[in-house]
Image: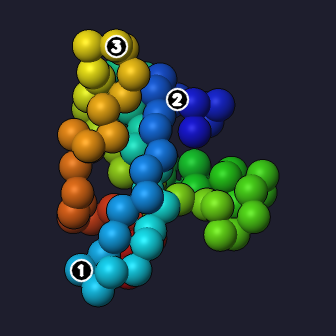
Amino acid sequence: LVNLPGVSGGAAAVRRTASGTPLLVGYIAVTPGLEGSFDVSEARARLSEALPAALVPRLVVVDELPTRTSGKVDRDALPWPVGGAEGED
């Protein structure tokens, strides 16, 4: 995720839908100043070129990635459920 153009940070997490289906979600923080021009569909297309279909996550743009005191991303603090996520079923 962090190798996508315009992405300053990223994290992936497996979430469950209301029906219990596991879903891979990619959370991305866009480089400051590029928020309005970042194209989620293009980012997903790039991931589709490099990854098997089952590993291409739903993408969610967040203002910033929450971190623990250790500096690691706090996946429990990432938003879920998310409304309007690209590719949401």
Relative to residue 88, is residue 62 depicted above or below?
Answer: above
Q: Is residue 30 visible?
A: no
| Disc 1 + disc 2, Cβ < 8 Å | no
Q: CA distance from mark 1 to mark 2?
A: 32 Å
Query: Upstream in the sequence, badge 1 or badge 2?
Result: 2
Q: Which residue has dot 3 on it? A: 70
| Residue drawn at point x = 78 percent, y = 52 percent | 50
- Image spot of residue 52 (x, y percent): 75, 64
- Mark 2 or 3, closer to the camera: 3
Q: Nearer the viewer, residue 73 or 47?
A: 73
x and y, in percent, of residue 58 in the image:
46, 61
Task: Describe the element under mark 2 as helix, strand or loop.
Answer: loop
Find numbered disc 3 in the image and state the secondary structure of the residue it sits on: loop
Q: Are marks 1 and 3 in contact (CB under 8 Å)?
A: no
- The residue nearer to you, when weighing 17 against 70, is 70
Q: Callout 2, which amino acid? A: Gly
- Indicate left or right for 14 with 65 as reference: right
Q: Secondary structure at mark 1?
A: loop
**Residue underneath mark 2:** 6
Work out how far the residue at label 1 is from the one at label 3, CA to CA, in angstroms.
Answer: 31 Å
Q: Which of the two discs, 1 and 2, sits closer to the camera? A: 1
- Residue in the foreground of this view, choosing between 87 and 65: 65
Crowdedness of circle 2 by 10 Å Cα count: few (<14), some, many (20+)?
Answer: some
Which residue is identified by label 1? 18
* Residue 46 can be seen, yes or no: yes
Q: Amino acid at mark 1?
A: Ala
